[in-house]
Image (cartoon, rainbow, N blue to C red):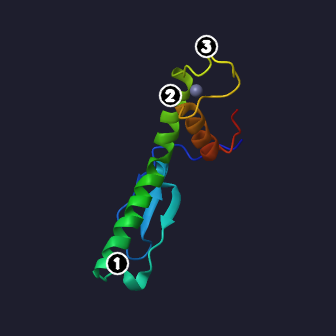
């Protein structure tokens, strides 16, 4: 499995040329949160809201390595009690956090968990 670019990742400052860049360690470009150039100077409410949304998306992407590490740490250290005293020892109980946690890790890494 290919590893992602090492963190931390940082959501950069807005630029009317590239939008919001997300950069990794050493300044490696992870992505540009593109923003239509013709709207860059427009402060209409819809444009302001869209800019805020795109900036929030850039921050979320920049947090991805930290979020993945946090999820993997929780997965290694925390256990559920779904299998104690049940007759279905192969499945987690409804509402258990473990399947959600592992699905998010699998989505981020491309790996398959149980
Ligand atoms: Zn469980």
> Mark 2 highlights which residue?
74
Instruction: Name above or below for residue 25 compared with residue 46.
Output: above
**Disc nearer the start of the sequence (1/3):** 1
Q: Residue at x 51, y 22 (%)?
A: 78
Residue behind label 3 places its C-beta within 8 angstroms of ligand 1: no
- Residue tagged 3: 85
Q: CA distance from mark 1 to mark 3?
A: 55 Å
* Neighbours of disc 3 within 10 Å: few (<14), some (14-19), many (20+): few
Quarter of the figure with residue 82: top right
Q: Are marks 2 and 1 in contact (CB under 8 Å)?
A: no
Give the quadrant of ligand 1: top right
Residue furthest front in the image: 87
Label 1 crowd (10 A; few <14 / some 14-19 / many >=20): some
Q: Is the residue under label 2 in contact with that under label 3 (CB below 8 Å)? A: no
Image depth: mark 3 or mark 2 in front: 3
Between 2 and 85, the residue placed more toward the observer is 85
Q: Nearer the viewer, mark 1 or mark 3?
A: 3
Please tell me which residue is depicted at 33% across the width and 71% down the height of the picture.
Answer: 49
Q: Quadrant of the C terminus?
A: top right
Number of the label disc, if any, that sits on residue 21: none
Which residue is located at x 45 percent, y 44 percent? Answer: 8
Badge 1 element? helix
Residue 47 image label: 1
Residue 78 sits above or below residue 56 on the image:
above
Q: Give the left or right position of residue 92, taking residue 24 as reference.
A: right
Q: Position of residue 61 (x, y in %)?
A: 48, 54
**Label 3 residue SS:** loop
The residues tagged by marks 2 and 1 sit, at their Cα atoms, a distance apart of 39 Å
For marks 2 and 1, the one nearer the N-term is 1
Looking at the image, which residue is at 38% across and 72% down? 50
Q: Residue furthest top?
A: 85
Horizontal and vertical percent for residue 59?
40, 55
């Amino acid at each position: 499995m290919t590893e992602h670019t090492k963190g931390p990742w940082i959501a950069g400052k807005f630029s009317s040329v590239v939008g919001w860049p997300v950069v990794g360690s050493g300044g490696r470009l992870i992505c540009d949160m593109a923003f239509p150039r013709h709207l860059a100077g427009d402060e209409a409410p819809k444009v302001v809201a869209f800019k805020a949304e795109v900036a929030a998306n850039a921050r979320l992407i920049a947090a991805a390595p930290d979020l993945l590490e946090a999820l993997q740490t929780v997965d290694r250290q925390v256990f559920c009690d779904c299998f104690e005293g049940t007759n279905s020892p192969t499945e987690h109980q409804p509402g258990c956090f473990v399947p959600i946690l592992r699905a998010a890790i699998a989505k981020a890494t491309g790996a398959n968990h149980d």
